[in-house]
């Protein structure tokens, strides 16, 4: 059994211009994606962060005894959550947005969302994208560092990198808590730096695909 409260080795964080701001210093402002955002994504080079599909909030993770191999110990994805994840994946394909490497949290709701959205597409399960809400500051550190690295590292080959993970993780990194099934667009700038570009909540896709 692997508990959510595991304590991986702490790595030094590379502070950046957004995440280094203390919570009281700046209030995160969400920007909605436009047709121009979609046009830019078709050329690749961006890092995308997708929060998993809708979940049953009446069934919380069984902290501290969450078993990554036993979905019954975790907050579950709902059937509607699987469907919305599938619709987001289909929307990305219809929009002709190329997806390259996919990195996903080990929790079941994320892995199931990924399978629904990208059936048959390979992905990497990354323990350092673990849900941060139940962790100490020391335990969060390597997850925040890994997320920063994936969002900031250049993306080559005309594709976009995709992370599928959790809302609290972005909250810890940049002070933004996206709703479930929201796709968040970042522009990598290297050396731990990135720019937030825009967000695509699931209900916006029909308008963007017109």
Image (cartoon, grey):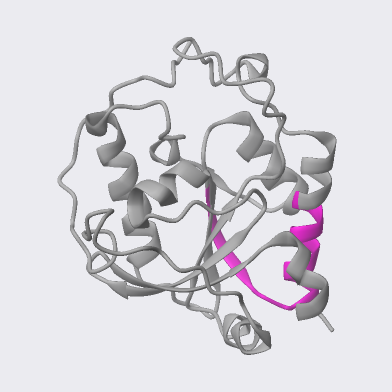
Image quadrant in which you'd find residue 128: top left
Q: Is residue 178 magenta?
A: no
x, y percent for residue 186: 45, 70
Q: Which residues are magenta?
A: 85-103
- Residue at image location 74% in from the left, 70% down from the top: 204
Q: Which residue corresponds to the image point at 57% horizontal and 86% vertical from the top-left?
A: 40
Drawn side of residue 174 relative to residue 24, left or right: right
Q: Is 19 located above or below residue 71 in the figure?
A: below
Question: 108 or 16, which is in the foreground?
Answer: 16
Picture layout, residue 32 above or below residue 202: below
Q: Is residue 101 magenta?
A: yes
Q: Is residue 88 left or right of residue 162?
A: right
Left-right relation of 121 to 207:
left
Q: 67 or 159: which is nearer to us? A: 67
Q: Is residue 6 above or below residue 163?
A: above
Q: Which part of the image, by quadrant, shows the C terminus?
A: bottom right
Most distant residue in the left direction: 12
Tell me: residue 52, above or below residue 89.
above
Q: Is residue 119 visible?
A: no
Residue at horizontal 15 percent and vertical 46 percent from the top: 12
Where in the figure is residue 168, as x and y percent of width and height?
45, 42
Q: Position of residue 44 (x, y in %)?
A: 54, 79
Number of on-image labels? 0
Q: Residue at x 72, y 44 (%)?
A: 115
Residue 58 horizontal/vertical position (percent): 69, 22
The answer to whether one can see residue 82 in this image is yes
């Amino acid at each position: 059994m692997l508990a959510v409260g595991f304590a991986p080795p702490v790595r030094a964080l590379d502070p950046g211009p957004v995440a280094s701001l203390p919570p009281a210093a700046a209030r995160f402002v969400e920007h909605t994606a436009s047709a121009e955002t979609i046009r830019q994504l078709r050329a690749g080079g961006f890092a995308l962060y997708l929060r998993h599909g809708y979940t049953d909030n009446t069934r919380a993770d069984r902290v501290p005894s969450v078993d990554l191999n036993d979905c019954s110990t975790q907050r579950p994805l709902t059937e509607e959550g699987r469907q919305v994840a599938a619709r987001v994946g289909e929307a990305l394909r219809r929009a002709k947005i190329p997806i390259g490497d996919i990195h996903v949290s080990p929790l079941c709701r994320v892995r199931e969302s990924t399978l629904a959205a990208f059936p048959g597409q390979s992905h990497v399960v990354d323990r350092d994208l673990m849900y941060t809400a139940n962790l100490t500051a020391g335990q969060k550190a390597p997850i925040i560092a890994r997320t920063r690295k994936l969002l900031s590292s250049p993306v080559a080959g005309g594709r976009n990198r995709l992370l599928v993970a959790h809302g609290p993780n972005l909250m810890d990194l940049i002070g933004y808590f996206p709703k479930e099934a929201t796709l968040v667009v970042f522009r990598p700038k290297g050396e731990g730096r990135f720019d937030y570009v825009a967000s695509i909540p699931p209900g916006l896709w029909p308008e963007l695909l017109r």
